[in-house]
Image: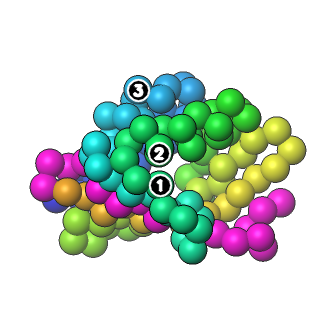
Amino acid sequence: MEAAAMQKVVQTYVEAFEKADLEMLRGLFAEDATQEDPVGSPARHGIEEILKFYKGGIAMGMKLRLTGKVRCAGNSVAFSFDGVMRKMTVSPIDVFDFNADGKIQRMRSYWGPEDVS
């Protein structure tokens, strides 16, 4: 997958939170995608479980702000950002692995208690 296409997915992901648009998020993921947020927690399987998770973040007013360069390698992209909501900020690094159709097949978010302020 081209780096520009992967970077566009990251930008759309950030924009979806800005617009509180679950359908925009749906369009980024494969139907059978998995999400592990944070890494080490039980994975969510399938787009409906993933959207249920995002619905909670959007309901809390979550907005994303990229904090570094988007890194592309193979069919994966990694990026750091701040997830800002009400009186809390979470600062993870997310990794998206893409399938042959350019959809997010696996999403993993790396953060722990020390990344919450």
Q: Tell me if residue 26 comes above or below residue 113 in the rendering.
A: above
User: Magenta includes 110?
Assistant: yes
The amino acid sitting under disc 1 is Arg
The residue nearer to you, when weighing 69 against 63, is 63
Magenta-tinted stretch:
100-117
The amino acid pointed to by label 2 is Ile
Question: Does the stretch in magenta take in 49?
Answer: no
- Reading the chain from its start, which is encountered first: label 1 or label 3? 3
> Which one is nearer the viewer's eye here, 102 or 59?
59
Q: Disc 2 and disc 3: Cα gap in Å? A: 12 Å
- Report x, y in % for residue 16: 48, 33
Please give the label number shown on residue 6. Answer: none
Q: Of helix, strand and loop, which one carries label 3?
A: helix
At 54% from the left and 38% from the top, the residue drawn is: 52
Circles 2 and 1: CB atoms closer than 8 Å: yes
Label 1 sits on a secondary structure element that is strand
Compared with residue 86, is residue 96 higher up or lower down, i.e. above or below?
A: below
Q: Nearer the viewer, residue 24 or 4?
A: 24
Q: Is residue 31 left or right of residue 38?
A: left
Q: Which residue is mark 1?
A: 44
Q: Residue at x 56, y 27 (%)?
A: 20
Badge 3 is on which residue? 23
Camera-nearest label, 1 or 3: 1
Looking at numbered disc 3 in the image, what kind of residue is underneath it? Answer: Glu
Q: Is residue 21 shown to the viewer in this render?
A: yes
Q: Where is residue 48 drawn, in percent x and y?
A: 42, 38
Per the image, the residue denoted by label 2 is 50
